[in-house]
Image (cartoon, rainbow, N blue to C red):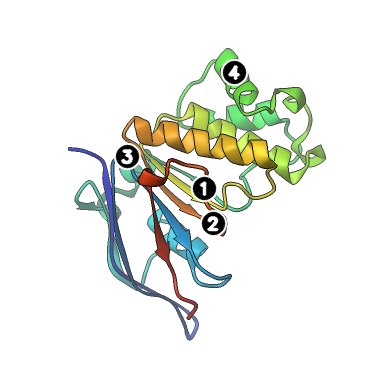
Amino acid sequence: MPHALEAENLQLWRAERHVLRGVGFALDAGECLQLRGANGAGKTTLLRAVCGLLYPDAGRILWEGGDVRADLAAYHARLIYIGHEPPLKPDLSALENLRFWIGVRQAVPRPALEAALERVGADRWSRRAVRTLSAGQRRRVALAALALLAVPLWLLDEPTTNLDADGQQLVGTLIDEQLARGGLVLAAGHHALRVAAARVRSLELPLG
């Protein structure tokens, strides 16, 4: 079965605020959906709901036709989620972070880790503690995980934040490669992704 992600009538409240109001979408293999909207419109909330970190009050998330809650562990094995702040430990080096982050999911030899860091331009600071890196440098370390993990679903929150023009193009190239191999990308962002236009659709979330 080709990879497919669907959201059906998602409803989510925070206290008395109705953040997600009947949100739905369908995403097929080789497609990218960019979530757009003002600050506070629920882009990050929707991403966290899709990856299973938040449970919507109503509605369903479907992966390949089945409700993801039926087997969250199996679903999580098929995705990578990179939030607005990359999940990096400040006292570990970039290389150590990548080895730990990826290593809990699959064994990756050191040369492959180093090659991924070089691919995203992070090899020059790969042995420095993450706490000494700039926000853009930390973002590049997180992008190396995308280059390493062969999973079909990418969930990305503001993937180009703090990146220069070359870094933004790198994000577009990585996404293009993911889509070319039949993967799916759900990304939140204010700026257009540098991806082939025919592969990207937008979903505008209203400010509640």
Q: From what the image shows, is residue 175 above or below residue 111?
A: below
Frontmost of labels 4 and 1 is 1
Label for residue 193?
Answer: 1
Frontmost of labels 3 and 4 is 3
Identify the amino acid type marked 2: Gly
- For this rendering, which residue is in front, 116 or 98? 116
- Number of marks: 4
Residue 108 at x, y percent in the picture: 51, 20
Local packing at callout 4 (Cα closer than 10 Å; few below 14, some 14-19, many 20+) is some
User: Is tag 4's residue or tag 1's residue first in the polypeptide sequence?
Assistant: 4
Residue 66 visible in the displayed image: yes
Reading the image, the residue beneath label 2 is 189
Give left or right: position of 100 versus 28: right
Name, please, the residue furthest toward the front.
197
Q: Which corner quadrant of the image does residue 39 belong to?
A: bottom right
- Name the residue at 58% across, 37% down: 169
Report, in whole angstroms, how far the alpha carbon at label 2 lies from the one at label 3. Answer: 19 Å
Label for residue 115?
Answer: 4
